[in-house]
Image (cartoon, grey):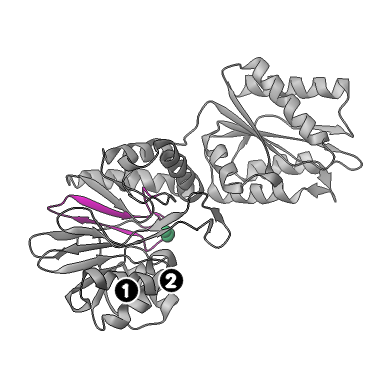
Amino acid sequence: MSIPITESVTWVGKIDWELRKFHGEEYSTHRGSTYNSYLVRDQKTALIDTVWAPFAKEFVDRLFEVVRPEDIDFVIANHAESDHSGALPELMRHLPGKPIYCTANGIKSLRGHYHQDWNFQPVKTGDRLSLGNRELIFVEAPMLHWPDSMFCYLTGEEILFSNDAFGQHLAAEEPFNDRVDPCELWAECIKYYANILTPFSPLVKKKIEEFVSLKLPLKMICTSHGVIWRDNPLQIVEQYLAWAEAYQENQVTILYDTMWNATRIMAETIAAGLRQAAPDLTVKIFNCARSDKNDLITEVFRSKAILLGSPTINQGILSAVAGLLEEMRGLRFRNKRAAAFGSFGWSGECVKLLTEKLAEAGFETVEEGLRLSWQPDGEGLEQCRSFGQNFAAKIR
Ligand code: FEO
C-alpha cells in the first residue's frame, strides 16, 4: 500500500491495526498505530525512515512495487528506535553501499541495534542534501525524544518530516488530520505528549522556537506515527507550545487502590467535598489497579492537582499505586499540587510514604495527608469531606 501525499512525496509505511501495546508492554495503543515511511522522488530519490521489524519483509516488498531498489539514492534515518529502523537490515540487503543519513548519535544507536557496517553519513542542523530541484534540510532534535532524534525539511514541498514529534498512535486508512475523528485524534495526541514528551517540555519549546527562527514556510507536517498534519499544520505546533508550559486544566484527579473498599469510600467522599467547595472543578476518580496506566498519566497531565490514595500493606503502598508513582517520578511533571490519603488497620505508614514520594516526584504537597483506621464511619466520612474542601481551597 502506498499513498500519494504531494507531487514528490509518497507514503510507503505500515498501518498497524492490531497494535495494542507499544514499547514492549509500556504504552497502550487502543487505536493501533502507523509506522510512517516516506519516499521523496526528485532527480534523486530518498527514503525517509522505515517500519518496525515484524513488518520488514512486507514493507520492503511493497516499497519495491513503487520504486526499484537501484533508484533509491539515499536513506534518511530520522530516529534509530526500532519502530522506525526495524526494517533497515532487510532494506539494506537490497541497497548495498547506499548512504544512510542520520545524526552522530543515530550512528551509535543503529550500530548498537544492528551491528552492521552500513555507509553512515552523519548530519548536523543546517546540513542540506540536494535531491535535484528540491533539498532536504536536516534539523537535529536531541531528546525529542531520544538523543539521536532528528527532523528533516523538504524545500519546494515545504514539508517537515518530524518523526515522533507531533505524532500519535492512531491507525487510520487515510492518515490525514482532516480525515480522522478529531476527538480520537486529539485524545491520542495528548496521551502521546503526556506519556512520552512531558520530561522534555523545556526542549520542546526551545526546538519549536529554533525551527520558527529558520523562517521556513510550512505546508505540511509528516510525522512517523498517525496522521499527516495537512490541514492547518501549525495547530499541533501551537498545542505543543501550550502543553510544554507546565500544562494544566481545571481538573483534580483522584487515583487510588483499595483492598476492602475503605480507601475507595475515602476517595469518593473526598471528591464530594471537592465538588462542594469548587463546583466548577472537574473531578475524576480512578482505581489505579483497574485502569490503563497511560490513560491515568494523561489525566495527571491534564490536572492541576492530584490526590493519591492507598491503604497500608506490609508497612508500604499497594503495588498499582507504587508503580504509578514511579511513572510520575520519571515524567517530571511541573506545577502540580498533590496530597495523599488512605485507610489502615494496624501500622498505617502508607500516607506518610505517599506524601514523601509525591514530593520526590516533583509535586507540591499541600496537605499532610489523611489517614483513617478501618472503615470510615460518620466522623471519618466528615473528615474526608473536609479534607476535600480544604484541598479545593488550597489549590484555588
Ligand atoms: Fe516512534 Fe521513538 O520511536
Which disc number belongs to residue 53?
Answer: 2
Q: Quadrant of residue 263?
A: top right
Asked whether 175 or 372 is in front, the reply is 175
Mark 1 secondary-structure assignment: helix
Q: How would you rate the neighbour count of disc 2 (Cα within 10 Å): few for under 14, some for 14-19, many for 20 or more?
A: some
Q: Position of residue 362 (x, y in %)?
A: 58, 42
Q: Quadrant of residue 244?
A: top left
Residue 86 visible within the image: no
Predominant secondary structure, magenta span: loop
* Relative to 168, 137 lies left or right: left
Which corner quadrant of the figure contains ligand 1? bottom left
Left or right, 243 with respect to 195, comes to: left
Counting from the top left corner in percent of width and height, residue 90 is at 36, 78
The range drawn in magenta is: 142-167
Q: Residues within 10 Å of mark 1 (few under 14, many from 20)?
A: few
What kind of residue is marked 2? Ala
Q: Which residue is mark 1?
A: 61
Question: Identity of the amino acid at label 1?
Answer: Asp
Q: Residue at x 33, y 45 (%)?
A: 206
Relative to 79, say whether 231 is above or below.
above
Residue 164 image position (x, y, % from top left): 38, 54
Percent x, y for residue 348? 85, 41
